[in-house]
Amino acid sequence: MEIELSLEFLRVVEQAAIESAKTMGRGDGHLADQAAVSAMRRVMDEVPMDGTIVIGEGERDEAPMLFIGEKIGAAQHVRGFNFPAVDIAVDPLEGTNLCATGAPGSITVLAASSSRGPSGRLTLLQSLVALASRSRDVGYVDLAGTLDPGFLADLGADLHACLVLTPGHDRWERGLAMARTLTGAGMPWMGVALGEQDRPRTALWEHALAAFAETVSKRGAVGVIAAPAPLAAPLAHASSLTLTCAAAGWQRAHGDVTGLRVRVTTTKSKVGAPGAEAMLLLRYPRPYAVAEVLGLPSVVAPAITVVDTDLMPAAAVAPG
C-alpha cells in the first residue's frame, strides 16, 4: 500500500470518529452508526483509488452504503487515471452502544489491501485446530506467520495439546516437510497455513506436498491446508476435499461485531458432488469461552452446529 493512501485512510477513520463522537450520550446507537458510515463513505470517495468493499455493513439489500461489493474511491467519478485497485474491510463504528451511552471504548475500523481481500480461511483453520486440540494432539505449521497463541487459547484450544512450528515466512517446502515428519511420527491432526505473499515456485515444494499427502493417507491422519487462491495445481490434485472461503460480512449483536460470516463452497470432493455451499459464522472469542463454528440456520438446512474434524478427509485445502 502506498504511503499516501495510508494517510488518506487515516483521514477516513478520523472523520468517522469525529462525526460519531458528536452523537455520544444521545442514547441512539443507530444515529451514531449512521453518522460514522456517512462520514466514512463521503471521505473515501475522495481517496485516489479504485476501491471495493469486501467486508462492510452487509449485503446490498441490507445496507444503503458501504455494502459488500460496493465500488468506492475517486475512480468512480474521475476518468482517465490508473487508480490502484484496493480491497477494503470496514466497521465504521465498533461499539455503537458505548457511543450511544457516552461510555468510552468505541472505535472506527478500516483495513485495506492492494491484493485480494480477507477470506476467513485462516480463522477457520485456527478454529478447527482449537476444536481438534480438545480431543487429541495437533500440529500447526504457520507458514503465513499470522498465528497468535493467545488468540488460539481464546478460541478454546488446549495449548498443551498444540505443537506450533514456524519454519519461516513462505518456506513452503520446509513447512510441508515438517508436517510430513510429524505425521509420520504419529501426530493425528496437522494444520498447515500457507502464506499469501511471495509464493515460491511450484517445483520447489510440490514433492514435499506429495510426500505429506501420502503420509497422511498411510497413517489415517487428518491434514488440513489453508492455501491462498487461486489454488496451485499440486494442491488441487492432492486434496480429497477442497473448500473455497469468501468473507460475507460481519456478524453483529446489539451494534457490536461478534464474528465473521464466511461462505464456504465445495469445489472438489471425493465423497460427494461438488457445488454444495454453507454459510459459517466464525464467532470472535469471548473471555473464558470457546469459539464456535456455527452454521446459520437461515442459510443452511439443516443447521450445522459444530464442525466435526473426525469427518474430514485425509487432506483438505481451503483456498480463498
Image (cartoon, rainbow, N blue to C red):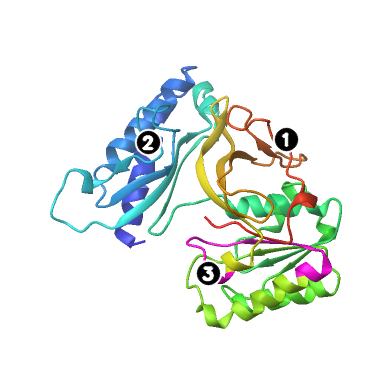
- Residue in the picture at 60% in, 75% down: 172
225 in the magenta segment = yes
Give whichever of 289, 135 is nearer the camera. Answer: 135
Farthest left residue in view: 80
| Circle 3 residue | 233
Query: Mark 1 is on which residue type?
Result: Thr
The amino acid beneath tag 3 is Ala
- The span picked out in magenta is 216-234
How far is disc 2 from disc 3 in space, using C-alphas?
Answer: 35 Å
Q: In x, y percent, where is residue 121?
A: 58, 53
Q: Is residue 315 left or right of residue 106?
A: right
**Against 300, is 86 above or below?**
below
Q: For residue 224, what is the image quadrant?
A: bottom right
**Residue at 44% in and 38% down:** 56
Q: Is residue 18 left or right of residue 78?
A: right
Which residue does the numbered mark 1 point to in the structure image?
305
Badge 3 marks a residue whose secondary structure is helix
Marks 3 and 1: in contact by CB < 8 Å? no
| Observer-nearest of 224 and 90 | 224
Say whether residue 42 is magenta. no
Disc number placed over residue 66 in the picture, else none: 2
